[in-house]
Image: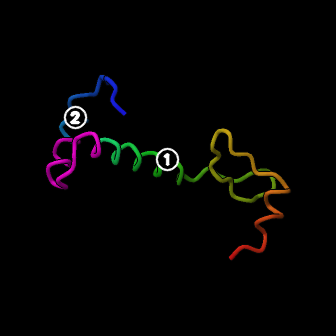
Amino acid sequence: MRTTLDIDDVVLAAARAKAQAESVSVGRALSDIALSALKAGAQENLGEGPSGFPLLPSYPGHVITDDLVARHRDDD
């Protein structure tokens, strides 16, 4: 998708260097950098809930229900 963005000079320089090193477009390199940051953020330790179980990251629009758990309970 084409769009116009206001990108910090340091970020653009990093994307250009990554693009050149990996022989990809600057857009692809910038997307890879952004996706890596999103994945790293999702892996942050969110602490523990009141029951002592670790909290997992949530994603907007993705609701875990009892029915969903039951359908996937025995998946390998």
- Which of pointers 1 and 2 indicates the residue nearer the eye? 2
Determine whether the residue tagged by mark 2 lies in a helix, strand or loop: helix
Whether residue 64 is in magenta: the answer is no
Determine whether the residue tagged by mark 1 lies in a helix, strand or loop: helix
Which sits in the foreground, 58 or 70?
70
- Label 2: which residue? 12
Which residue corresponds to the image point at 57% horizontal and 53% vertical from the top-left? 45
Q: Position of residue 53 (x, y in %)?
A: 74, 59
Report the amino acid beneath label 2.
Leu
- Label 1: which residue? 41
Q: Residues within 10 Å of mark 1 (few under 14, many from 20)?
A: few
Q: Position of residue 60 (x, y in %)?
A: 65, 39
Which sits in the foreground, 22 or 50?
22
Report the amino acid beneath label 1.
Gly
Left or right: 10 with respect to 69?
left
For the record, the magenta segment spans: 15-29
Q: Tell me the quarter of the picture where residue 59 sits.
A: top right
